[in-house]
Image (cartoon, helix red, strand yellow):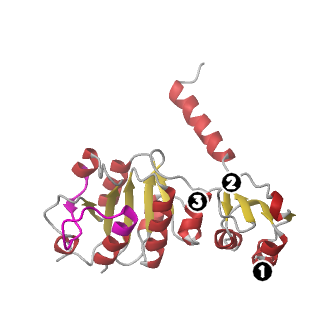
Amino acid sequence: MKKPKWVVEKEQARKAAAAETVWLFGLHAVRDALMNPKRQKLRLIVTRNARDKLAEAIEFAGIEVDMVDPRKFTAPIDAGSVHQGAALEVKPLDWGGLAENCIGRENPRVILLDRVTDPHNVGAILRSAEVLGASAVIGTRHHSAPETGALAKTASGALERQPYLRVRNLADAIIELQGMGFLVLGLDGEAEVTIEGALSEGRDRPVALVLGAEGPGLRQKTKETVDQLVKIDAAGGFGSLNVSNAAAIALYASRP
């Protein structure tokens, strides 16, 4: 019996995901990945100078080293990448699902990203989320930044510690979080209520903050699914914030 098309596509996607690898680069990103026992490490390419700087992490990971001449750095990364003489091939991290990452902590805070595709923005958001105590950053499998070397370098180590989940459907994830008791707030510059106003009587409950891409903002479906649209209280009429800055401010403003 011939398999349905959707079954074939699902199997192909699963095989592609299993074969996927990521090249991390830069001393900080590579060191943190080497020190992460949850990270599956495949190949490390370093210059002699980088090997010396990463000696402790290399020993901890127990990984063999491919030593290369600095003038002939052979890792398959973009030529303009600031690799600092170190590149590590890894498997993407598997953090699991929403429930195991978003509940359990007292007064959890979660960030959801609606079509935020720039890896530098997502990396900066992961860094802020880790510093400000968020439980997870959630994007979508399509139309969001995947785990890449550029994202990891911008995250400055946070990629190894801050759960970055990618779900099939953002609206379904919002509904699932609402079912867990989360108050889901969508950031919209045209909203009438500030984050502080929306949380004036609800700082002791779980809160999820949804941010859209710069320019288009939140999709209509997302706006219809969140509990309330809110804004960051701005001093003037300059315009909108960069999404990574907005995420940091929103997290800080929503603290319990």
- Residue nearest the viewer, comparing 239 with 116: 239
In the rendered image, residue 232 lying in the magenta stretch gets the answer: yes
Tell which tag, 1 or 2, sits nearer the viewer.
2
* Residue type at numbered disc 2: Ala
Label 2, label 3: how far apart the Cα atoms are: 12 Å
In the picture, which quadrant includes the C terminus?
bottom left
- Residue 150: image location, x then y, percent: 58, 59
* Residue neighbourhood size for the residue with mark 3, other residues' Cα within 10 Å, grouped as few (<14), some (14–19), many (≥20): many
Image point 28% across, 74% down: which residue?
205
Residue that badge 1 annotates: 56
User: Relative to residue 69, is residue 175 drawn left or right?
Assistant: left
Q: Position of residue 212 (x, y in %)?
A: 33, 55
Whole-number angstrom distance, CA of label 1 to CA of label 2: 28 Å
Q: CA distance from mark 3 to mark 1?
A: 24 Å
Mark toward the start of the polypeptide (3 vs 1): 1
Provide the secondary structure element on which disc 3 rests: helix
102 magenta-colored: no
Q: Which residues are magenta?
A: 225-247
Residue 93 visible in the shown view = no
Specify few, some or many for label 1: CA neighbours under 10 Å numbering under 14, 14-19, or 20 or more: some
Identify the disc placed on residue 150: 3
Determine whether, in the image, residue 5 is placed left or right of residue 132: right
SS label for mark 2: loop
Mark toward the start of the polypeptide (2 vs 3): 2
Q: Amino acid at mark 1?
A: Glu
Residue sitting at x 47%, y 54%:
118
Q: Which residue is mark 2?
A: 79
Q: Is residue 250 left or right of residue 66?
A: left
